Image (tube, coloured by chain):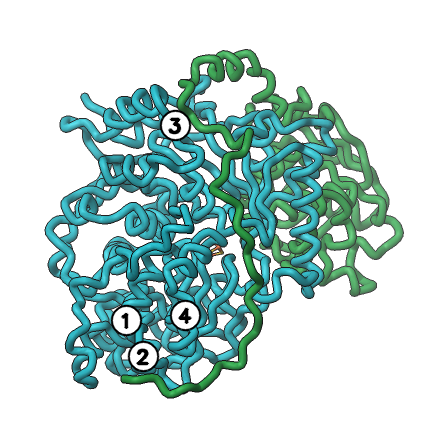
Chain colours: A green, B cyan
Amino acid sequence: MEKFTTHTGVGVPLRRSNVDTDQIIPAVYLKRVTRTGFEDALFAAWRGDPDFVLNQDAYRSGSVLVAGPDFGTGSSREHAVWALKDYGFRAVLSARFADIFRGNSGKQGLLAAQLAQEDIELIWKVLESAPGTEVTVDLESRTVTCGDVVAPFQVDDYTRWRLMEGLDDIGLTLGHEEDIAEFERSRPSYKPTTLPAKHLPTVEVRAARPIALPIQPVSR
Amino acid sequence: MGKTLAEKVWAEHVVRRGDDGAPDLLYIDLHLVHEVTSPQAFEGLRLAGRKVRRPDLTIATEDHNTPTLDIDLPIADVTSRTQIETLRRNAAEFGVRIHSLGDADQGIVHQVGPQLGLTQPGMTVVCGDSHTSTHGAFGALAFGIGTSEVEHVLATQTLPLAPFKTMAINVEGQLPPGTTSKDIILAIIAKIGTGGGQGYVLEYRGEAIRALSMEARMTICNMSIEAGARAGMIAPDETTFAYLKGRPHAPEGADWDAAVEHWRTLRTDDDAVFDAEVTLRASDLEPFVTWGTNPGQGLPISASVPVPEEIADENERVAAERAIEYMGLVPGTPLKEIPVDTVFIGSCTNGRIEDLRSVAKVFQGRRKADNVRVLVVPASARVRLQAEAEGLDRIFLEFGAEWRNAGCSMCLGMNPDQLAPGERAASTSNRNFEGRQGKGGRTHLVSPLVAAATAIRGTLSSVADLAADDPSFADLDVAELDGSPLVPLDPRVPMQV
Ligand code: SF4
């Protein structure tokens, strides 16, 4: 995971509250087998609307999403975070996040920064009156700067530390590799392994075929 | 103070205690993988340049998307084919053992682990599938995980986990004839609700549980998740050891002795305290069916569709109204008068050999009701082979049922086995959510015996009802409808699943 100390990028005002994960990425995109390339799926239902904020040139290259309260509610799909990241977002600012979304963001290195709604409103005004204005999100000092607006934000200490160190959950666990290896040495020998594979005798499995059900009289 | 079974298994797997409030790091003994929830996890490894830490504790099988017909032909559905091919490629690239379509060990992931003897008491077992709780029947701590966690386990063989609470579910007394472990778990869920187990690991205990076979125990643990629980467990005993002995991956020789000695310690201490406790009398049970759209909306089969106006709780009333409308039912209708279009016998809940045997005992020498389509889908290719060795397939076909290849099939309808809109099914699977078995499809969850009786009468029925309208059933001994073999095994097929 990339380290995150401070990020500066074009702010995108998303004046909507309760943006749920179905709106962030509709269910049809969940059938994909890849982890990347979800940028086209982000806000898919709204992207056809020429007035939608991401369809306006000034915001197109945005990387800081400034959203209304209750962002990321609904299904727990991690795809919502992947889609935001693939599009190029590094941070989402909102007055309130759904817990699971916040958790998933932390795992994937997307900063979910919680601001007071008044500050969100001030930032929206700046971004809307001067589209293309950049927003600086400083994780070190936990402040957001946009034009004249300087606002504090909240993020829990653990997530902040992980983002600043660039540690995802896996990286963090691998930091304890010695402990894991040590544990493995003490596992009893009777614990099973899948390899080398052991089987019952291999038997040919015949394919079932569609059947026209034979209607035969059966003795009852 | 003593420890519960779940706490013991947890304690044996702590790699690292989390300091102040941080989660414990738990070692995972067995990681089961299937095609639907693994592709992004493997891709994540690839993007980060990581390897699978323990391919030898990982096993993959194809189940959710696999067709149950024509398995030797290319898979017609493009999404399904892509997911399956992706799994095959990932397994090859990362060195993970895989059982593909056509392989005798292919099947639903929760059948494959136990039948190979890979699921053993006291293990931690995970899979990107909520019904991983099935493996708890062996006294393993087994739970479903999300895709990020799948990646975490692949890369580290561990998971950071916050502790859980424990709940004892005591099932006292003996089950009446014609009732099964499916009826026990449906009754439990109806009692504690679909959220009643939230945050808990359930431990099923009591005389009725001890009397169950391993397969029947798996049915109960399988549906723990339907009560909202993290996992379900049953302490291992002689039944467990007998099931495991001689399976391909069961310990042998001195290892077996050491293992059994340890497994015997895996029981809740007498002075241990559960965070919650629920008791159920097995002797009061009768076959259970669901009438609504969540597994908690179930009733004894002699009851009637609820009348919403009579439900005091506002939320429950609204939920019932909605469910009854979706299910196309009339309040007050006796459940036994509800006609079904399809009977589905299969899934990781009830697609095992014992389930098929008990169904075959009811079917033998009879024919299905004219308007009903009957689908019998074994949980794994081994179960299918075993059933064929016992001649069960002939009974099913003569009955007028379709006999299919192994997989999840109509449990979730990711393959072509789906309900049409408005079609009504009696299903031995575990979820009756709206559209679960096909868009607009209506599902009644039932035991294999109820499914079998329903296939004959055409309306939701228990086996006891069969004799009532057809004297030829009088000699059907309900008490003998257990999962024991129907006919002697063919000695040329040295197989036990
Ligand atoms: S049979 Fe159904 S519940 Fe079981 S793993 Fe397959 S889809 Fe899930």
Give the mark, 3 or 2, whose residue is nearer the N terminus: 3
Image mark 1: chain: B
Question: What distance separates the C-alpha of mark 4 from that of mark 2?
Answer: 12 Å
Disc on res. B366: 2
Question: What distance separates the C-alpha of mark 1 from that of mark 4?
Answer: 14 Å
Residue type at tag 4: Arg
Image mark 2: chain: B
Query: Are marks 4 and 3 in one subunit?
Result: yes
Residue behind mark 1: B362
In this view, the mark in front (4 or 3): 4
Residue type at tag 1: Val
Residue toward you, B450 or A43 = B450
Question: What distance separates the C-alpha of mark 1 from that of mark 2?
Answer: 8 Å
Residue behind mark 3: B251
Give the residue at x 37% y 87%.
A217
Residue A132 seen in this snapshot: yes
How busy is the neighbourhood of tag 1: few (under 14 within 10 Å), some, or many (20 plus)? Answer: many
Residue type at tag 3: Pro
Question: What distance separates the C-alpha of mark 3 from that of mark 1?
Answer: 37 Å
For residue B323, what is the image quadrant?
bottom left
Q: Is residue A1 left or right of residue B487?
A: right
Residue toward you, A200 or A151 = A200
Question: What distance separates the C-alpha of mark 3 from that of mark 2?
Answer: 43 Å
Image mark 3: chain: B
Q: Is residue B417 left or right of residue B18?
A: right
Quarter occupied by the N terminus of chain B: top left
For residue B165, what is the image quadrant?
top left
Residue behind mark 4: B394
